[in-house]
Image (cartoon, rainbow, N blue to C red):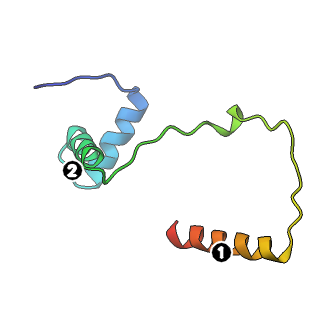
Amino acid sequence: MPTSFTLDPEIQRKAMAKAAEDGLSSLSSAIRLLLAGYVSGRISIAAIPALDAVTVEKVEEIPMNTRRKKLAGRIFAAARKHG
């Protein structure tokens, strides 16, 4: 079943060039691969608010005792390991 949608012309041009660069026969091939990965759970798509949309109202300082510093170190190390 054919499906159509509209893309911003500049994004479409860049995506078509990138698809060709990567050896895909067309932009629709790239979109099919993306959607297949999304449906199978290999690709996640998320909406993340833009940084300019976030407002910080109050910053609190949390004292870092030795236990908290060690915990933070383990958390940051795990985050770096897993990207």
N-term-proximal mark, 1 vs 2: 2
Which quadrant holds the N terminus? top left
Instruction: Give the residue displayed 62% in from the left and 74% down from the top.
Output: 77
Q: Say whether marks 1 and 2 touch (CB < 8 Å).
A: no
Instruction: Give the residue displayed 87% in from the left and 40% down from the top.
Output: 58
Q: Residue furthest left?
A: 1
Residue type at the position of mark 2: Leu
Residue type at the position of mark 1: Arg
Q: Secondary structure at mark 1?
A: helix
Compared with residue 8, is residue 35 higher up or lower down, i.e. above or below?
below
Between the residue at mark 1 and the residue at mark 2, the CA separation in whole angstroms equals 42 Å
Compared with residue 42, is residue 64 higher up or lower down, i.e. above or below?
below
| Quadrant of the rendered image containing residue 70 | bottom right
Q: Secondary structure at mark 2?
A: loop
| Quadrant of the rendered image containing residue 49 | top right
Please name whichever residue, 31 or 66, is drawn nearer the observer in this view of the structure.
66
Instruction: Give the residue displayed 86% in from the left and 46% down from the top.
Output: 59
Classify residue 82 as left or right of residue 73: left
Q: Which residue is mark 2?
A: 24
Nearest to viewer (mark 1 / mark 2): 1
**Mark 1 surroundings: few (<14), some (14-19) or many (≥20) residues within 10 A:** few
Query: In the rendering, at what x and y percent does residue 23 appear?
Result: 22, 55
Q: Which residue is mark 1?
A: 74
Instruction: Give the residue displayed 30% in from the left and 50% down from the top.
Output: 41
